[in-house]
Image (spheres, helix red, strand yellow):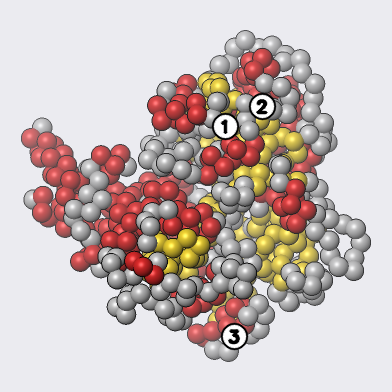
Amino acid sequence: MTQQEIADLCVNSLAHTLRVDKARIDPKAKFNRLGLDSAMVVYVMMELEEKLDLELTTDDFYDYPTVEELSGHLAKLRAARSAA
Amino acid sequence: MDCFSSLVALLAERARSQRNRRAYTFLGDRGIEEAALTYGELHQAAQALAVRLKDLAQRDDRAVLVFPPGLEFMVAFFGCLIAGIIAVPMMMPRRNSARDSSAAILANCEPVIALTTSAFALRGDLQARFEREGLQWLAVGLDKDGSHDAGMPLPEPDDVAFLQYTSGSTSDPKGVAVSHANLLANLEMIRLSLGNTSRSTYVNWVPLYHDMGLILNALQAFYVGASCVLMAPNGFMQRPLNWLRAIHTHKAEVACSPNFGYDLCVSRYRSEQMQGIDLSNWKVALNGAEPVRADTIQKFIETFAAHGFKSSAVFPAYGMAEATLLISGGQRGAGHMTRTASRAALQAHRVALPADDADAQTLVGCGRALQGERIAIVDPERLRRLPAGEVGEIWVNGANVALRYFRNEAATINALHARIDGEDEASWLRTGDLGFLDDAGELFVTGRIKELIIIRGINHYPQDIEQTVQRLHSSLRQNGGAAFSVPDENGEEVLAIVQEIERTERTKIDAEELKGLIREGVTDQHELFARHIELIRPGTLPKTTSGKIQRSLARKLWLDARLDLLSDKGAD
């Protein structure tokens, strides 16, 4: 899965959790700017864990606080796993 | 049950008669057992802490309890009770938040000491925050040796055991002063209503700084001499099915949650993760702390019946910190009852049959008054009692109702010492909630007078959110905003904000940028998603002649799409 595909997954999950149109999710916007509260972070995290088969923590969302940064981080995690 | 003068006397008795019985077990985020205390060990650790506290604080001084999930909180709580120090449980301040309710609570209760775990005492931002308040830290562990009698006088029944700050805005914090007599009265009422015994194992994920987690779970289990398994709240939020797995593993009889927790279990249900999980031993699935929804209950029963969950275990309840915790509840094994009423009539505070299907709203009964307690439905303006079947404010009288708020006499007189016009001198709690009683005394909660926003079981005050918004940008008019909750497409409460823009800024502002700023500010300060934000023209927010914001009218205008929006495209 490419980083772009992962970014699309993130956008879908955010739009679904916030119940807004996908077009409104700016990949460069910080998650708190989108209004994502800590319970919603957990919902999005669960969905990404399931779809990407990764184990994540909520800290990932604070350390990589935009779709762009998070998808880059997730792509690296997946690459590191397939290399191992 | 035998009569005790305080929880301290009861703890000594548990430590004597059930010394090696497991009192508390803690499961970490992944559901693995991380710590445990027997009644004997709990008593020893609490006594050791009480001895340390004696050197640092006087009786009736306050101590704030700021703990990550774990059993140290219970040691700290009982240690304070033994030493006669008034415990003040507090939510852990958030990492990034500049301001929150903790500052207002500290200013109101003026603690002399803060208790936490040694690991948390190291968190830099916490140290800085409490240092500013001149607070001394004390790290609490689970040390099980060094048993010595603290040799302190037992508390009297009317002594304050702890302060519960779940109500009151930042500008007017209200710490319910819960006495030992209040606690023992409510714990006995809960025991009778839930039908608990020493075999009633609990599994709880609700945080201990929340009254539902502390009183209904941790203290009720202790009161009946049962065992209580505590889960990390975050672990539940991430993997709600682990709660059900723990209920199965520990053969728990009682497990409680606000309504949203049951929804979460249904939405996270995966049959392959639930193989072999048997919920048939679960006798009381209490649902409280936020409005109880009929469709949530129905879906939960349908989803988990295949795993042995019995509909008779459903246990809707109603309560609040001012009544120590529980106000009404059903009977173990009786299940829940519903009633269909007209939505339009309920909005006008009347009970009537629905005109058609679209007008039908299903209400869930929240049980009846507890043993030794009275519930009255009262006209909130004329202060006269209303008959069964009529909607009014819910009032409560009983030994579980706190005598006062800590250092807030006006609120005490208004909310805790109310009188019903034309009746005896009994003193009543005004809950600020609306409801009615049926002919059999079943309580139906239908709405709220107080302008409180309850989301995921946590109370939020509109004035706090409005103030946050108005501090964000100079174009956002002071005293020109309203925050309220509206139902989303599933009927759950979500946050809506309307805010006036300053006249001089009207043409200059970037509306989308401002809405983003508001969303971010509210998320950071209040842990809430502002689902709807509307910017309106100056002077158009409804206010009374004295300038008070009319939030319920603003809400109605929002629902009817009749607000004077800044731009015509406006809708968020």
Q: Nearer the viewer, residue B349 or B337?
A: B349
Residue B323 image point, x, y percent: 72, 50
Identify the image quadrant of the N terminus of chain B: top right
**Residue at numbered disc 3:** B354
Q: Amino acid at mark 2?
A: Cys
Comes first in the chain, label 2 or label 1: 1
**Residue at numbered disc 1:** B65
1 and 3 marks in contact (CB < 8 Å) = no
2 and 1 marks in contact (CB < 8 Å) = yes
Q: Is the residue marked by circle 2 packed among few (<14), some (14-19), or many (20+) residues within 10 Å?
A: many
Residue B302 image point, x, y percent: 46, 64
* Residue B267 visible to the viewer: no
The label nearer to you, 2 versus 3, is: 2
Q: CA distance from mark 2 to mark 1?
A: 10 Å
**Quadrant position of residue B38:** top right
Image: B362 above or below B4: below
Could you tell me which chain the residue with mark 1 belongs to?
B
Q: Secondary structure at mark 3?
A: loop
Q: Residue furthest bottom?
A: B355
Residue B107 image point, x, y percent: 60, 38
Q: Nearer the viewer, residue B561 or A57?
A: B561
